[in-house]
Amino acid sequence: MFKSDTAAPLHRPWRLRAWVWFWSLAALALPASCVIASWSICSSVNESVKNIEEAHAVELTAELIIKHMETNQGRWPSCWEDLPRVGSVRPDVVIDLQKRVAVNWSADPRKLAQAKAVTDHPPFRVVWLKNGSPVHFEDGEPNQMILDYLRREANPN
């Protein structure tokens, strides 16, 4: 009987240590998991906001180019300075567009209107994001917007 009484206390410290280790690791893992999950969510939200801003930028650029052509007998704008004159766009917005969006200022609208599409994408690229991202809204692909406008003007029926 004496041996069984002394044997039990020898095994308990190992069990106690195992539980202490388990709960210590759990106490560290839970906050770490929360931090990682929060970082992941914030990163995803930040990327989504960036994509929305970029989609707005290329769409607005295409709209400004189209407005410029509407008010200037179909002439393509020669630089960014031509665009703020065709709407109520604040200069700081145009500065932001300049940072994000590239435009082929030497494009010829007559040649663009005659370009033949081989795929469902526009046959030219005159407006694009400087970072190379293909982000745009569903009906806001800038080159398609410009192509649609040019074709409407070429065939007003």
Image (spheres, helix red, strand yellow):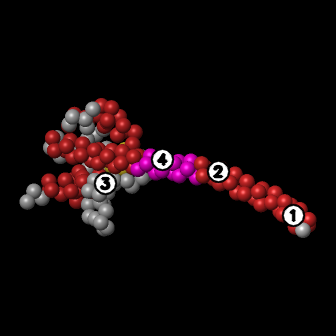
**Residues at circles 3 and 4 in contact by the CB criterion of under 8 Å:** no
Specify the farthest residue to the front: 1
Neighbours of disc 2 within 10 Å: few (<14), some (14-19), many (20+): few
Foreground mark, 3 or 4, reads 4
The structure residue drawn at horizontal position 72% and vertical position 57%, both measured from the top left corner, is: 19
Residue type at the position of mark 2: Ala
Residue type at the position of mark 1: Asp
Residue tagged by mark 4? 42
What is the C-alpha distance between the residues marked 2 and 3? Answer: 44 Å
The structure residue drawn at horizontal position 25% and vertical position 37%, both measured from the top left corner, is: 83
**Residues at circles 2 and 3 in contact by the CB criterion of under 8 Å:** no
Residue type at the position of mark 4: Cys
Q: Which residues are magenta?
A: 33-48
Q: Quadrant of residue 88?
A: top left
Question: Is tag 3's residue or tag 4's residue first in the polypeptide sequence?
Answer: 4
What is the C-alpha distance between the residues marked 2 and 4? Answer: 23 Å
Residue tagged by mark 2? 27
Residue 5: mark: 1
